[in-house]
Every structure is written in C-alpha cells, then in structure tokens.
C-alpha cells in the first residue's frame, strides 16, 4: 500500500507552536535530534506493507529521507487538497491502487509494527474509509500528561488517530462534506453538527455508542466506514501544543538512550 504523508502546516504567529517554527513548516520542528516528520518517515521506511511514500507540503530541499521510494508534492493550500493531490499522485504511480494510507507528519511516536498492524487489520474487510480512534485509558496510560481532547460516547471516550486508510474513490466523492469534516477535525461537536442535529444531540447526551456513531455517519454520508480501535496511543499522540511537543521530545530521547544502551 502507498502512503500519503501530509506536511503542509505552517504555524501562524497566533499558533502556540509558532515560537518553535518562526514561519517554517511544523513538520520540521526538531524532536530528539531530527525533524518531527523524519520519525514518521522512518516508521514507514521499515513497515513491511508500505511500498511508496508521497509527501505533500515539503520539497527535497527539506532534507528528509525515506528508504521507500519518496515523491514530493507542494502544499495545495489545505489538508483536503493535500490529501486529494496525494491520491492522484498515487494513482499516477500505480493506476491499480485501491487504498491509500494517510498519515499526519506530527505523530513522531508511531512505529513500523503499528503501521503494519493497521494495514493488516483494515484489509480484513473492504470498506471505503477506516478511521482510527484511541480510547482515553490507552492514551493516558502511555502519555499521562498529554491532555488530549476526547469525544465522550455512551460506551467510551476516544480521541482520533492521525493515521488512517481510505479507498481511492474517496478522491471523487462527497468532497464538500469531507472539507467541512476535515476543517472541523479538532472539534468533534462541530463534526457532529455537520452530520446533523440528531447526531449532535445523541453525542451531547452520551446516548450513542462508538459503533452506533460509526454506522450513523456511514449512512449519512453514504459510504462504508469502519472504526479501528487502537491499542497503541502513538497513533493519536500528535503535536498540537508546546507541552505535547516537549513530552514527545523527552519520550523519544529516552527511547534513543535505551536503544543505545541495549
């Protein structure tokens, strides 16, 4: 499966991460001695099921590398446009492609075996979209001070994963809705409102389970969607705020020290 890595974000002065970037891409923030995105590319390099990587938002001048064939695309202006551009590039490289792995550049904790686990788990079925969630207890056990934003459902509290899988046909279907959902990706309530007031009400009153929510969204959009529940918090541990950046810097530095001592 080919992977699309989105790296188009450049923090503005009002963004809490701006002091770490000064107008440069967020993906290039140093994390334990290398650019944040390089950790992601290293994981994809060693993942058995990843064939090629399309990187959207950086150029070869960035200096990032990958052991898999790596293709650079310029930033298209927003996340949806970047994903669509990546899908079109994948289809150009491999017209027979059916699914793509969509990976954010700001989950430096992700590991190769986690990438392979997601692909193997998802490909047991033939759905349109596979959307990952991390239960609160999984996240807080691994990263106790991460302070993630959780969606409260009837049966669990979850945050979204930043590595997911989609069928390439999604590049031509429901684009207006995808744009609104992706634009509100940091606000589960706004996403629910986009899908209908009834869904929003059920979410606010915690009267809907994770599976019921997935089924309702799939029916509303007209796709076959499947939720992947992660046992690894790294998939949802993205860098949005300075304390999360420092947490991952310390965690990955400690990991490097332990690896060097082994």
Image: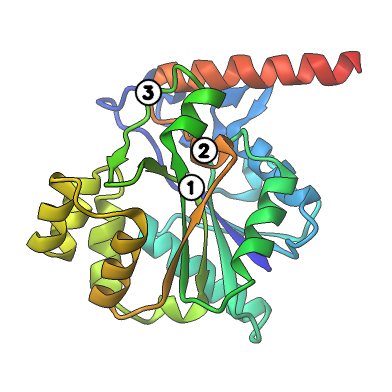
The quarter of the image holding the N terminus is bottom right
- Residue placed farthest to the right in the image? 262
Compare residues 70 and 234 and report the one nearer the observer: 234
Q: Position of residue 169 (x, y in %)?
A: 46, 82
The secondary element bearing badge 1 is classed as loop
Label at residue 147: 3
- Residue at 15%, 54% (x, y): give it: 202
Q: Nearer the viewer, mark 1 or mark 2?
A: 1
For label 3, the crowd category at 10 Å Cα-Cα, with few meaning under 14, some 14 to 19 and many 20 or more, is few
Q: Residue at x 13, y 46 (%)?
A: 205
Question: Pointer 1 and pointer 2: residues touching (CB < 8 Å)?
Answer: yes
Distance between the alpha carbons at the discs numbered 2 and 3? 16 Å
Between residue 141 and residue 98, name the one nearer to us: 141
Q: Which residue is mark 1?
A: 162
**Which element is circle 3 on?**
loop
Q: Residue visible at 64% across and 86% down?
A: 95
Q: Position of residue 256 (x, y in %)?
A: 77, 20
Q: Is residue 206 left or right of residue 103?
A: left
Mark 3 and mark 1: Cα distance apart in space: 16 Å
């Amino acid at each position: 499966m080919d992977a699309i890595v989105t790296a188009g974000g450049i923090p503005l002065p009002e963004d809490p991460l701006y002091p770490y970037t000064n107008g440069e891409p967020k993906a290039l923030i140093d994390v334990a001695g290398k650019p944040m995105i390089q950790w992601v590319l290293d994981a994809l390099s060693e993942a058995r099921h990843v064939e090629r990587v399309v990187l959207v938002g950086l150029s070869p001048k960035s200096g990032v590398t990958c052991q898999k064939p790596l293709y650079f695309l310029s930033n298209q202006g927003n996340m949806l446009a970047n994903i669509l551009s990546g899908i079109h590039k994948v289809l150009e490289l491999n017209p027979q492609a059916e699914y793509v792995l969509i990976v954010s550049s700001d989950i430096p904790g992700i590991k190769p075996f986690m990438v392979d686990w997601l692909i193997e788990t998802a490909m047991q079925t033939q759905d349109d979209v596979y959307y990952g969630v991390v239960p609160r207890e999984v996240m807080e056990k691994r990263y106790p001070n991460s302070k993630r934003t959780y969606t409260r459902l009837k049966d669990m509290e979850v945050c979204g994963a930043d590595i997911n899988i989609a069928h390439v046909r999604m590049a031509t279907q429901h684009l207006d809705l995808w744009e609104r959902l992706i634009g509100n990706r940091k606000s589960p309530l706004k996403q629910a409102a986009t899908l209908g007031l009834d869904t929003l009400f059920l979410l606010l009153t915690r009267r809907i389970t994770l599976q019921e929510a997935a089924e309702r969204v799939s029916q509303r959009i007209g796709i076959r969607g499947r939720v992947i529940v992660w046992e690894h918090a790294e998939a949802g541990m993205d860098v949005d705020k300075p304390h999360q950046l420092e947490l991952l810097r310390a965690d990955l530095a400690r990991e490097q020290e332990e690896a060097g001592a082994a």
